[in-house]
Image (tube, coloured by chain):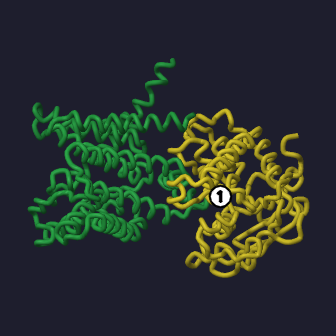
Chain colours: A green, B yellow
Amino acid sequence: MRLLRDALIWFAAIAAASALAFWLGGYATDVYRKMLIWVALALSYNFLFGIAGQVAFSHFAFAGVGAYAIVIFAHQLGLPFGLAFILALALSAALAFVVALPSTRLEGFYLALATLAFSQLVLVVISEGGDLTGGTGGIANYRLPHVFDVTISGPWYTVVLVLLVASTLWMLRRLDRSAFGRACRAIRDNAVAAAAMGIDVRRIKVLAFTLTSTLAGLAGIAYAYIDNVINPPVFGLENIFLLLFMIIVGGAGSHIGAIIGAVFLYLAPFVLEPIVGHGFMVVFGVLVVLTILFQPSGLAGLVNRWPARRAT
Amino acid sequence: MSAIPLVSISRLTKHFGGLTAVQDLTFDLHPGEILALIGPNGAGKTTTFNLVAGVFAPGEGSIALGGERIDGLPVHAIAARGLMRTFQHNMPFAGMSLTDNILVGCHTRCSDSLFDILIGRRRVRRRETAARLRAAELIKFVGLQDRIDDDVSALSFGEGRLLELARALAGEPRVILLDEPAAGLTQPEMTRLGAIIRDIAARGVAVLLIEHDMHFLLPLAHRVVVLNFGRKIAEGTPEAIVRDRQVIEAYLGEAVGDLAMRPASA
């Protein structure tokens, strides 16, 4: 019965999120699609940062690897789309694995520095890649090719993004509730005790980093066909910090928190910008500090308290 | 007690720079046995624990578990072979529920590949169900069933000890190492802990413990190994140990010999 109920909830949520795509206008569709990419990235980054406890700043770099790889493989090099897709995903995964091997030996501050350096490296490579990456101007004027003679465009591409978010959430939730998820949380809380319980700490860390970074690569691939433009600044540092803010404000370690945080902080500037201009980043900064001080479980923690309050 | 040792420690030596923490230490541990490691501070007890658990690799000597050499293996590999431990200071996974804390102890019993987890293999689900049943049993076994919904950071020190014990037992260990399990416990908690440790040993698990509280230890241990300055100075039954001249001089002092043999909670 629970299985049936869960399936119905998933189906209803996906259907509602997809239906929205057909109802929204041009500008709102663009906002909605980018919000879905943020949610997908926030979900995987939450697993890495909030659940596995790895303070890594390479998430957008891997999204960049995915986005540039698909465009270069499919359009600059003209490979068949299916092959280009698999190669782009494989490249994200392989690169994530290579970065994870030395990085996961590091902890806290040092992991942050190493992954920050990697992010800068990716940024330099895509900015200085000449004709292959389009330099600082990036690449434009390509479109999603037909896959099996089907053209996915308009609201249907938004549905693809909804499915991306849904499958990311489904995967990460399933892993979180398994021995793997418990091992990740145990390492985050106390790596020494985790090892004494038979957990191969390095292996789990490398797996968590590689898996979540590959999911970032997948979100990057999907991002590449929203505007049919990619350029370096999107994958720079400003966005990785915004992603971190989303997780903290939403509630680190909670999937629903990642979704709430991403939607909230992505949409907030649309409300704030007319009032405070570019000052909204200051508002975000204050929000993050307040969250850390007074509501460490984030917005998700507030949501979880509601039923308890009603009961009393 | 079985004649074949489960853990065989032979001529173990560990130097830290110029300091010899453990020297030429040899002893065996049998299934179902409660063996206590005692000695003054700095005698090498915790170092011995860390050598057995794989935190340090020994300089010389060997450690075998069930006939297989384990010295030099990483901590997690030794744990996976059935040797679990608790720590001198409580080390709960503070961000996880009580049940999840104990389920972490089952890790070696349900570590499936990510792919198997994602496709929901029946084997994965079966192990998960079994692990949850076992965790529920263990929570009852150590008597924490009333705390099941509480934050683990809200547990008292003694309850934290019991949680660690349950967590270590969750992996169905063949050997369990307890580092000062009674330290900081109240008298009733100690009595309960003693009963639990006896119960564990009665199920065939070998228990190796470090303890300073002789009232707690002497009625509990089947055998005692006494260390001083990294060397074994005595080994034998608690009755023999408390009458050993060398042990009295090095550690116990004159009065303890008689005092200690009174039952702890008479």
Q: Residue B44 at x, y = what percent? A: 68, 68
Give the crowd class for mark 1: few <14, some 14-19, many >=20 residues within 10 Å. some
Amino acid type at circle 1 is: Arg
Specify whether B209 is left or right of A20. right
What SS does tag 1 mark? Answer: helix
* Res A306 quadrant in image: top left
Q: Work out which quarter of the rendered image holds the N terminus of chain A and state it.
A: top right
Residue shown at the point (49%, 61%) measured from the top left: A204
Q: Nearer the viewer, residue B159 or A87?
A: A87
* Nearest to the observer: residue A30 or residue B144: A30
State left or right for residue A132 relative to residue A170.
left
Give above or below for B88 relative to B12.
above
Do we see residue B160 in this rendering?
Answer: yes
* Up-down relation of residue B167 to residue A5 (above or below): below
In this picture, residue A288 sits left or right of residue B110: left
- Residue receiving disc 1: B109
Closest to the observer: B82 or A294?
B82
| Horizontal side of residue B106 vs A170, given as left or right | right
In which chain is the residue bearing label 1? B
Toward the viewer: A182 or B35?
A: A182
